[in-house]
Image (cartoon, rainbow, N blue to C red):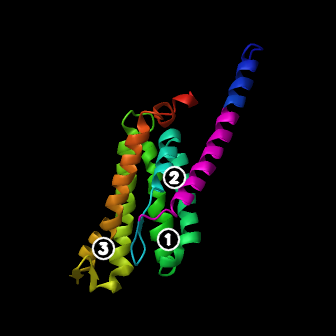
Amino acid sequence: MSHENKPNAAYNSAARYVVSVRCIAEAAIMVALAQALSYIKLMQLPNGGSLTPAMFPIVLFAIRWGWKHGLLASFAFGLLQLIFDGAYAWGWPSMLLDYLVAFTPLGLAGLFKGKSWGIFAGTALGCALRFIVHYISGITIYRILAPKELLGMTFTNPHFYSLVYNGSYMLPNTILALVIAGVLYVPLKKYILGQDLR
């Protein structure tokens, strides 16, 4: 390596370090914000599941930093949800599916990092994947709840019951996250697209 390249290498190394520290700091802030927002329950279902604005900070972080960092942040959020809101878990399979596995795919929103429409596509993808995990949990772990009454209907089919039950809070959660993204997109566009990180 020439003497001219050594300062550049040192600068690049320092820049990567600063970015890494910033990523960790933002992850901590967004996970903490998501956890705080999870206590704002606009709707609460009897067997778990609620409508909250908590998913948006996780999706926002994933869009800014990419899916790898997003998966770690969303896993951490799922772990916090299990610790502080895990009363609805039915044993370790439910803990695994309904919290750790269900929340982690929110980080895959980061697949759309840098795309002008990425926050919307990422939100839809993350929410859809979370719904799928909850649906699987519903037809495997919670199938013992059928027949069950919900929304004035009696369900005897666990597949249909899981679809309606989990859809009744995941669809509103998806819409809420998309509305928040729409409201904040213009004022936070550079932040959302990570243009301040370049």
Residue shown at the point (53%, 71%) measured from the top left:
85
Relative height, residue 136 to residue 116 (above, below): below
Relative height, residue 67 to residue 1 (above, below): below
The span shown in magenta is: 16-42
Disc 2 residue type? Leu
Q: Position of residue 178 (x, y in %)?
A: 36, 48
Quarter assignment of residue 169: bottom left
Q: Position of residue 53 (x, y in %)?
A: 45, 56
In the rendered structure, which disc, 3 or 2, sits on the residue that comes first in sequence?
2
Residue shown at the point (22%, 83%) measured from the top left:
154
Label 2 environment density (alpha carbons within 10 Å; few <14, some 14–19, many ≥20): many
Disc 3 residue type? Ser
The residue under label 3 is 162
Q: Nearer the viewer, mark 3 or mark 1?
A: 3
Dot label at residue 71: 2
In the rendered structure, which disc, 1 or 2, sits on the residue that comes first in sequence?
2
